[in-house]
Amino acid sequence: MAQMKVEDIRGMSEDQKQDAVLNLKKERFNLRFQRATGQLENTSRLREARRDIARIKTIAAQTRAKKK
């Protein structure tokens, strides 16, 4: 999964954002296990997944703040 773009995230519904965060958290969990067992080849993917989660949560918070 490539880095998520801000425009793509803004186009998502709230349910889609929640699903994306859930999927990224699962991926991050699996990546941590791969790293611990020495099977992780792309170590930068851990950082990308963490930042994608933060990016989605930030944009979701911004849209909630605009609605108020």
Image: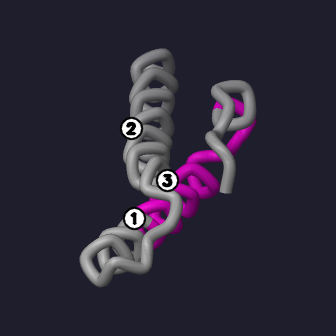
Task: Return the x and y of residue 36 as percentages of the image width and height.
Answer: 25, 76
Mark 3 closeness class: few <14, some 14–19, many ≥20 residues within 10 Å: some
The vertical placement of 58 against 15, above or below, is above
Residues packed near mark 1 inside 10 Å, few (<14), some (14 to 19) or many (20 plus): some
Q: CA distance from mark 1 to mark 2?
A: 13 Å
Quarter the C terminus occupies: top left
The answer to which of marks 3 and 1 sits earlier in the sequence is 1
Horizontal and vertical percent position of residue 48: 48, 44
Image coordinates of residue 5 in percent, x first then y, are: 68, 31
- Mark 2 neighbour class, 10 Å CA radius: few under 14, some 14 to 19, many 20 or more: few
Q: Does residue 51 belong to the magenta stretch?
A: no
Residue 27 versus residue 10 in the image, above or below = below
Q: Amino acid at mark 3?
A: Arg
Give the residue at mark 3: 45
The kind of residue on which mark 2 rests is Ala
Residue at mark 1: 28
Question: x%, y% of residue 17?
Answer: 56, 50
Label 3 to label 1, Cα distance in Å? 8 Å
Q: Dividing the picture into quarters, in which one does residue 28 lie? A: bottom left
Start-end of magenta stretch: 10-27
Query: Mark on residue 54?
Result: 2
Give the vertical position of 57 relative to 2 (above or below).
above
Disc on the earlier residue, 1 or 2: 1
Q: Main secondary structure of the magenta part?
A: helix
Q: Are marks 2 and 3 in contact (CB under 8 Å)?
A: no
Q: Inspect the image, locate mark 1, and give the three-letter code of the amino acid beneath it.
A: Arg
Q: Residue at point 52% right, 59% down?
A: 42
